[in-house]
Image (tube, helix red, strand yellow):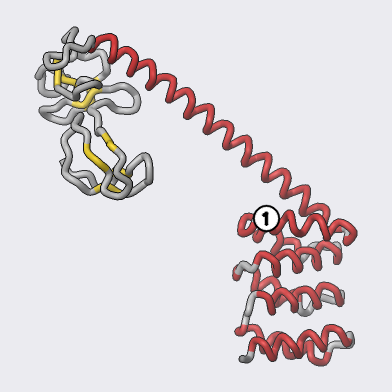
Amino acid sequence: MKLELLNCPACNFTLGETVNPNHPFKCPACGSTIVMTDWTKTGQLICQACDAVNAGFNKFCEACGVVLQVGCPFCYTMNSVAAIHCKKCGANLQRAWQRQTTWLEEKEKHDLERKHALQAAARSQEAYLERLLLQLDDPSNHPTAIPSIRMFGPEAVEALIKLLTNADPDARFGAAIALGEIGDQRALPGLVKALKDPQAPVRYWALDALGKLRAGETVDEIRPLLKDKHPSIKKLAKEIIKILSR
């Protein structure tokens, strides 16, 4: 059969070779030995004659009625599921297949536990980000909160954009600083609007962020700040326009 969607479990290389079930072959990318078994991850059996999926305890295919066969885990020779010993190497197949079934059950349990652990970790990270965002309402927290928020990267952008319209000006300019540090283009519309904020620190840091984002398309929106009543904003606007106009 032709494999088009199977990836090497060692290096994730997409395999596209013609292989036979229960016959080992090497990954062309990393050289790892791979065996495509006729067992599914839940222990079901795939009929060699018609490819129907059968329960692991079936001896005959539910679809076509042929005797189900499974590869020996040691020499990969196909044997009847009722066989006690492998017809080629003599291995105790029933014992080996039982171990395989037990391993599959343990793997399924481990995968479920890992999934739950990852979900819990994600919830914990979300809660941590929320706490950091709340700290932006106090400028004394900015030196520690903003670098931590930056580590979240794109995950923090949408929440920071919302903070640009927060009632607290400290949170607004803290969000502008963080957005400049992250450098995500999604922040451009919100930062452009922040250029008209009534609070000077918000305008200043929104301007600074646009400069860091190299947002040349915002030069026309920045020009009015050349006449801002705050000298530091006028100076920064002049510098950024010069940079973005190159």
- Count of residue discs: 1
Residue drawn 65% across and 60% down? 158
Q: Quadrant of the N terminus?
A: top left
Q: As drawn, is 72 to the left or to the right of 138?
A: left
Q: Is residue 54 above or below residue 84?
A: below
Say what secondary structure mark 1 lies in. Answer: loop
Q: Which residue is mark 1?
A: 151
Q: As drawn, is 234 to the left or to the right of 66?
A: right
Residue drawn 18% across and 28% down? 52
What amino acid is found at the position of numbered circle 1 in the picture? Met
Q: Is residue 10 above or below residue 150?
A: above
Q: Is residue 51 above or below residue 230?
A: above
Q: Quadrant of the C terminus?
A: bottom right
- The one nearer the camera, 191 or 122, is 122
- The one nearer the camera, 99 or 168, is 99
Q: Is residue 244 above or below residue 133?
A: below
Residue drawn 69% across and 85% down? 221
Q: As drawn, is 47 to the left or to the right of 116?
A: left
Q: Quadrant of residue 176?
A: bottom right
Residue drawn 25% across and 41% down? 26
Where is residue 104 drawn, in percent x and y? Answer: 37, 22
Where is residue 141 drawn, in percent x and y? Answer: 86, 56
